[in-house]
Amino acid sequence: MNLPFSYQKILVDQINIPTLLVKDYGALGLSETDLMVILHILRLQKEHELLPSFDQISNHMSINSNDVSNVLKNLKNKGLLAIDQFEDENQIVHEWYSITPLIEKLYEVQQEVNQSKNEEGKLFSLFEQEFGRALSPIEIETISYWLDDDRFKPALIKAALREAVLMGKLNFRYIDRILNEWKKKGIKSVGAAKQNNQNNFNQTNKSTPEPKGIHPFIITG
C-alpha cells in the first residue's frame, strides 16, 4: 500500500514509542498481555497491516482471537486505543489502530515522574534546612523508605516534618510515628491530615472541662 506522507510520519512516531511503553506500561494499568497486543499491532502496522485482524494479532501469541478482542475492547474503554481514519491520494478512506491516546498518557506519566523526582529532591533539602545540618546516611535511607516502600507523597512527609517542628519534637522517630499513625488511618493527603488534627483538637477540647466564667474563644483582659 502506498501511504501518504502525513500518515507515514504518524506511523513512524507510533513505531518509535515502544521503549517508553515497555518501561512505563505498568503505570498505565496495563498487563503484559495488553503490552504484547499493542506491540504486535505496531509490528503489523510496520508491515502495512493498518487494522490487523484479531487472528493476525493472536497468531504469534499464546492467547486466541477472542482474548485479543477483549484486550482491544478494554484498551478502547480505557481511552488508550482508537480506530482512526485517513484518506489516501485516491480519496480512499482507510482505518487504522491509533495509539496516540496511549502515547499522550505515557508522556503525562513521564512528566509526573519527573515532577515527583523534583519534589523529592526539594524534600531532602527541606529536612537539612530544618535540622540545620547535613543528613546522615541512615536519615537519607529513612526518607527514601518513606517515599519508596511506604509510598508517602512528598507533601505528606513535609506535613509530618512541619508538625514535628511545631511540637518541638524534631527527630526522625517522632516524624515516623506521625506518618505511621496517618497510614493506619488511611490518610494519604495533606488535607486529610489537617482534618485529622482538627478532629483530635476538637475531641481534646470536649474532654477538657472549661474554666468557669471564661469563654474558650474570648480572651478577656
Image (cartoon, rainbow, N blue to C red):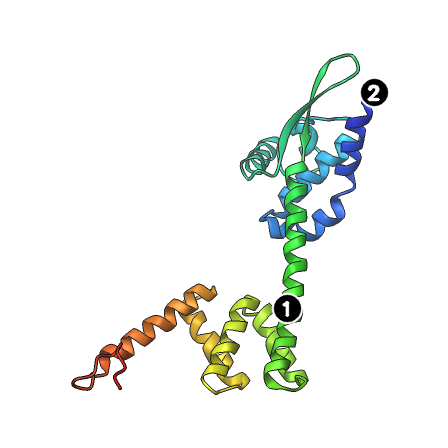
Indicate the amino acid at tag 1.
Glu
Residue holding disc 1: 120
User: Under tag 2, what secondary structure?
Assistant: loop
Q: Quadrant of residue 185?
A: bottom left
Q: Residue 33: horizontal and vertical position, in percent?
A: 63, 44
Residue at the location (65% across, 59% down)?
115
| Visible residue check, residue 152 | no
What numbered label is drawn on residue 15? none
Q: Is residue 192 above or below residue 40?
A: below
Report how far apart the C-alphas of labels 2 and 1 lie in the structure. 50 Å
Residue placed furthest toward the top: 90
Amino acid identity at mark 2:
Asn
Q: Position of residue 188 (x, y in %)?
A: 47, 64
Q: Residue at x 50, y 82 (%)?
A: 165
* Pair 2/1: label in front: 1
Quarter in which the C terminus is drawn: bottom left
- Horizontal side of 175 relative to 5 (left or right) equals left
**Viewport quadrant of the N terminus:** top right
Residue 190 in percent (x, y) is at 47, 66
The residue singled out by tag 2 in the image is 2
* Count of marks placed on residues: 2
Q: What residue lies at 63% left-to-right and 86% top-to-bottom?
A: 132
Give the camera-side residue of 76 and 108.
108
Q: Position of residue 51 (x, y in %)?
A: 69, 26
Q: Residue furthest left?
A: 212
Look at the numbered disc 1 and give the secondary structure of its residue.
helix
